[in-house]
Image (cartoon, rainbow, N blue to C red):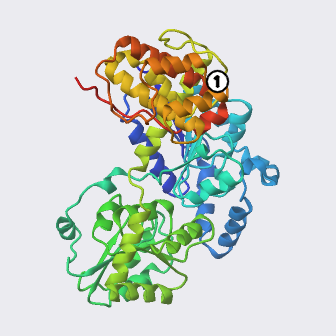
Amino acid sequence: MEKEVKVLILTAPFGSGHLQVSGSLVAQFQKNPNTVVEEYDMYSNEYPMITKTMQKAYLKTYAPIGKDIYRMLYYTSSQAIDQTLYAKLFKPLMDFGKENLRQKIRDFSPDLIISVFPVTSLYKLLRKELKIPLYTVITDYYANGLWLYKDARRHFVATNRIAKWGTEKGWDHRQFALTGIPIHPKFYETLDAESLYRKYRISAKRRTLLISAGTHGVLPGVGEMASQLIEDNYLQVIVVCGKNERLYHDLKGIPNPAGRLVVLGYTQDMHELLEISDILITKPGGISLTEAAVKGVPVLLYKPVYGQEMENAKYFSEHSAGIIASNRTELMGAIFSLLDNPAYLEQMKENISKLAQPHSAEKIVNDILQDVTEIALCEICKKHHVRKPSHPLEGALVPDMPASIGKLYEEATAIGHISPTAACALLRLGIQKLFNQVTGSEMPVAKSAELLIRGGQLSQEDKDILTACHVMGNRPIIAGVIDETDTKDIADDLGRFLLEAVQKLITEPKAAKRLTWRFPDVVARR
């Protein structure tokens, strides 16, 4: 039975994006029977009154003065937060919630922590007190220094821009994974558009504009926007007001004799609305943009505030998947330009679809569980409590065994569970790939062996074993080629050699980092 893995996900109530992402990850982890996952909103649970004040302050960032303050704070932390003077100047803020967080971690005792919101007090705890793997899921298409932690195992990102920043600063490229932003799996479902037109009482013959005011209904000028658009008889408009009750009632009061304006409050059915929409008008939150990309709906991004929203908007604009409008004149011009040019609208649909990275939650969860398994394998190897085929592995292991090394070791130690012929095929191919990657060239095993012997990385005895097992030759080994005359003894010899080769790679970090290849699935011919 596999060891139970305990996962703690840290989230926050500032905007709905963080909670949506953590919810998607929880649902995905729960599909794994040996995983126990807990979602923890420290702000709402431990500091409800302060959190309400902070939420109000968050909404103030859409007010004129608040925009300027948020802009200054956001862009001044352009470096990893724990490496800047910013952290010293705002130490009380950086340490916020540390005691409660420490206690939560001790009570739950997680094997790993996932952060979908930059909880800065966590960084100090992990660096000075707790040795727990941290994984960060960044919920926008850009990240400032609050998100970036040098000792994180992985930052899961939506663009290569963030990874490029980290590697240029000297961080390991394995600390970044391009997976996209997790959204609810219902956005990948196939829906019947005709039934949705009937559900929302709109016509399939008109162009549909979807206006999303955001969870808190903060998109400016929605009433004027909707009133002007429904003057066109060929258009119909759906407005999602979120939790803004005043906006909802104001829109309900707009004369709507033709029924071409549909007004909704907070909804969890955005997947349905996007299915029947031609254009989405919204503020550029990371989740909203990801949902639109998955559904292939071009976006008009109205008056984005500086910070992550502006950076998100720029990214989609640069990829011709969205248009930024700074006032209502620009917005209306963009809407009617798109509607009057169907070819351009279709091209934008194609462009935004290219930005979609489907099933991000599944990718992230699989990557984390595999990485945790490899961490555990390293720890086991360090203690020499490995399952031994014929002899123990010796040597000091590097702290972060590459995924392929761990996979090779796992396959080699379990080689007796498959037929000797299949084992030989796997091992021959594994040795070929090991040799090619250590020598840095695609050459036959025999030539690779000579090169490694001259470099002192391979002994003559090793070469004799490979020769006896029919591995040596002047042509590269082809995947899946199996010698029907192979015996268990040959498989054992190959397995022993491969373990020794893996051991050498493990004890040589430079060689290990170059290794990216994994075993394929090979079925023995009978």
Q: Residue lying farthest front?
A: 474
Q: Is residue 274 above or below residue 378?
A: below
- In the rendered image, the quadrant that contains the C terminus is top left
Place residue 515 in its image quadrant. Answer: top right
Seen at 38% across and 84% down, the residue is: 338
- Badge 1 marks a residue whose secondary structure is loop
Residue 503 spot, x, y in % from top left:
59, 22
Does residue 28 appear anywhere in the picture? yes
Residue 298 placement, left or right of 191:
right
- In the rendered image, the quadrant that contains the N terminus is top left
Does residue 111 appear anywhere in the picture? no
Residue 117 spot, x, y in % from top left:
58, 49
What residue does disc 1 label?
397
Residue neighbourhood size for the residue with mark 1, other residues' Cα within 10 Å, grouped as few (<14), some (14–19), many (≥20): some
Q: Amino acid at mark 1?
A: Leu
Q: Is residue 505 above or below residue 237?
A: above
Residue 163 placement, left or right of 198:
right
